[in-house]
Image: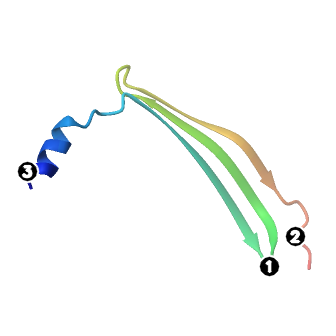
Amino acid sequence: MGAYESALHQTKEAKSMTAHAQLALIDSGAKLLTLEGVAKIDHNQHIGNVANKKCGIRKHLGN
């Protein structure tokens, strides 16, 4: 437990973070919906931002 506790105290917290997310809704191999976004957070300034980079919707859903 001592090594874990020491490592925990020596680990620095990230001051900012960026997360990239991609989502696809697929039915029988056909993409119906695609989304791509980015979330950013800055702990020092207490601010965050989420942005949609791309969005695609298949218009024809026929058989």
Alpha carbon separation for disc pair 2 and 3: 59 Å
Q: Earlier in the sequence, mark 3 or mark 1?
A: 3
50 or 42, nearer to the observer: 42
Image vertical order of residue 45 relative to residue 7, above or below: above
Q: Quadrant of the C terminus?
A: bottom right
Q: Quadrant of residue 34?
A: bottom right
Q: Are marks 3 and 1 in contact (CB under 8 Å)?
A: no
13 or 5, nearer to the observer: 5
**Front disc: 1 or 2:** 1
Q: Quadrant of the N terminus?
A: bottom left
**Percent of width and height locating residue 53:** 70, 39
Looking at the rendered structure, which numbered label has been put on residue 2? Answer: 3
Q: Earlier in the sequence, mark 1 or mark 2?
A: 1
Q: How packed is label 1: few (under 14 Cα within 10 Å), some, or many (20 or more)?
A: few
Q: Quadrant of residue 12?
A: top left
> Which residue is farthest top?
45
Q: Secondary structure at mark 2?
A: loop
Q: Secondary structure at mark 3?
A: helix
User: What residue is rendered at 76% in x and 75% in y?
Assistant: 27
Residue annotated with mark 2: 61
Q: Earlier in the sequence, mark 2 or mark 3?
A: 3
**Percent of width and height locating residue 2:** 8, 50
**Percent of width and height locating residue 30:** 83, 70
Alpha carbon separation for disc pair 3 and 1: 52 Å
Alpha carbon separation for disc pair 1 and 2: 12 Å
Question: What's the amino acid at mark 2?
Answer: Leu
Residue annotated with mark 1: 28
